[in-house]
């Protein structure tokens, strides 16, 4: 694993202490880390999945809209935060690697380092109660 920027290391450290699920990606969209609360929703431990490219994580969790239609990567908040470098939010469904389908709310935002260096994006998400 290549050396990460100090801001990414610190963001990962903070995420490890939060009770909210957190998902961190680098500037090219590669998954760098998700915390233990995220493991419960994503259906797999990060130690078992490890880092993965955006093409994989944006589809492996089978994101869908409320009607069950596949949510393309370009509509997902984390991809929007990466592409547009702006915060994004959306409620949608995903299927964890454990096979369970969950309704989630996702808020993503870009991660910038000192001197405006673009370092990736962070998603904070949570499972929504059945309505």
Image: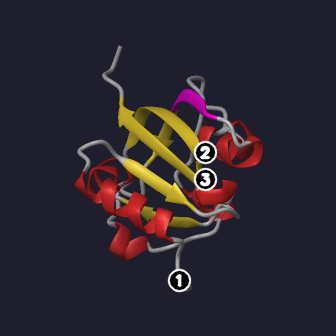
The quadrant of the image that shows the C terminus is: top left
**If you read the primary sequence from the N terminus, does the residue marked by circle 2 or circle 3 appear first?**
2
**Residue at 55%, 39% in the rendered image:** 108
Q: Say few, some or many: other residues with alpha carbon within 10 Å of mark 1 (under 14 / 14 to 19 / 20 or more).
A: few
Instruction: Report whether 80 appears left or right of 67.
Output: right
Q: Is residue 86 depicted above or below 1 in this figure?
A: above
Q: Is residue 46 depicted above or below 109 in this figure?
A: below
Q: Residue 125 is drawn in which quadrant? A: top left
Helix, strand or loop status at disc 1: loop
Where residue 49 appears, as percent x and y from the top left, is: 43, 72
Query: Magenta-highlighted stretch: main secondary structure?
Result: strand
Q: Residue 131 colored magenta?
A: no
**Residue at 51%, 73% in the rendered image:** 51
**Residue at 60%, 64% in the rendered image:** 26
Instruction: Report whether 84 appears left or right of 56.
Output: right
Residue at image mark 3: 112
**If you read the primary sequence from the N terminus, does the residue marked by circle 3 or circle 1 appear first?**
1
Give the Cα distance between marks 2 and 3. 14 Å
Residue at image mark 1: 3
Q: Nearer the viewer, mark 1 or mark 2?
A: 1
Q: Which residues are magenta?
A: 87-92
Give the Cα distance between marks 1 and 2. 22 Å
| Front-most of residues 64 and 74 | 74
Where residue 94 appears, as percent x and y from the top left, is: 49, 41
* Residue positioned most to the front: 115
């Amino acid at each position: 694993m290549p050396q990460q920027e100090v801001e990414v290391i610190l963001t990962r450290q903070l995420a490890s202490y939060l009770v909210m699920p957190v998902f961190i990606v680098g500037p090219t969209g590669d998954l760098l880390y998700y915390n233990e609360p995220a493991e419960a929703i994503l259906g797999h431990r990060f130690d078992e999945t490890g880092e993965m490219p955006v093409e994989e994580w944006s589809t492996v969790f089978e994101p869908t809209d409320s009607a069950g239609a596949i949510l393309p990567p370009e509509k997902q908040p984390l991809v929007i935060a990466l592409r547009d470098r702006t915060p994004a939010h959306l409620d949608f469904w995903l299927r964890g690697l454990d096979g369970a389908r969950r309704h989630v709310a996702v808020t993503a935002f870009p991660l910038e380092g000192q001197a405006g260096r673009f370092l990736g994006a962070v998603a904070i998400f949570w499972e929504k109660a059945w309505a």
